[in-house]
C-alpha cells in the first residue's frame, strides 16, 4: 500500500469521525431513538440500567443498508 492510499484512508476516516460527531450532536433531537418498545430499562431506588436493544438493531439495519448501497455504487 502506498502513502497515497494511506492518505485516502485517513481522509475518509476523518470525514467519518466528523459525521459521527455531528450525529451525536443531533442524537437528542430525534424523538423516538432510545425510547423504542424493545429497549430495556430497569430503574431501582439507587440503580438504573438501560440497554437500547431495539435502537441498536435499528441503527445496525440502517448502517448495513448504507454500506450495501455504497458498495453497490463502487462497482
Image (spheres, helix red, strand yellow):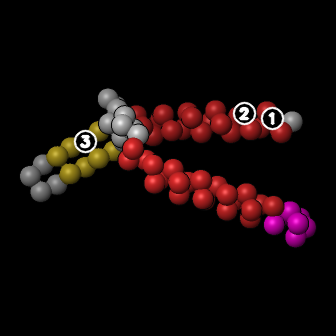
- The local secondary structure at tag 1 comes to helix
Q: Which mark is residue 7?
A: none
Q: Is residue 24 left or right of residue 19?
A: left
In the rendered image, residue 40, in percent from the top left (x then y), is placed at 29, 39
The residue located at (39%, 44%) in the rendering is: 29
Residue under label 1: 73
Q: Is residue 67 left or right of residue 5?
A: left
In the rendered image, residue 46, in percent from the top left (x then y), is placed at 12, 57
The residue located at (88%, 66%) in the rendering is: 4
Q: Nearer the viewer, mark 3 or mark 1?
A: 1
State the residue lying farthest toward the top.
37
Q: Is residue 23 left or right of residue 33?
A: right
Instruction: Name the quadrant containing residue 53.
Output: top left
Q: Which one is nearer the viewer's eye here, 6 or 33?
A: 33
Whichever of callouts 3 and 1 sits on the residue coming sooner in the sequence is 3
Image vertical order of residue 29 relative to residue 10, above or below: above
Disc 2 vs disc 1: Cβ atoms closer than 8 Å?
yes
The residue located at (29%, 47%) in the rendering is: 50
Residue under label 2: 69
Amino acid at each position: 500500500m502506498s502513502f497515497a492510499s494511506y492518505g485516502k484512508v485517513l481522509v475518509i476516516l476523518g470525514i467519518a469521525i466528523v459525521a459521527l460527531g455531528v450525529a451525536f450532536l443531533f442524537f437528542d433531537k430525534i424523538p423516538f431513538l432510545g425510547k423504542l418498545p424493545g429497549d430495556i430499562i430497569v430503574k431501582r431506588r439507587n440503580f438504573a440500567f438501560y440497554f437500547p436493544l431495539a435502537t441498536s438493531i435499528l441503527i445496525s439495519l440502517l448502517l448495513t443498508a448504507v454500506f450495501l448501497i455504497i458498495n453497490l455504487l463502487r462497482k
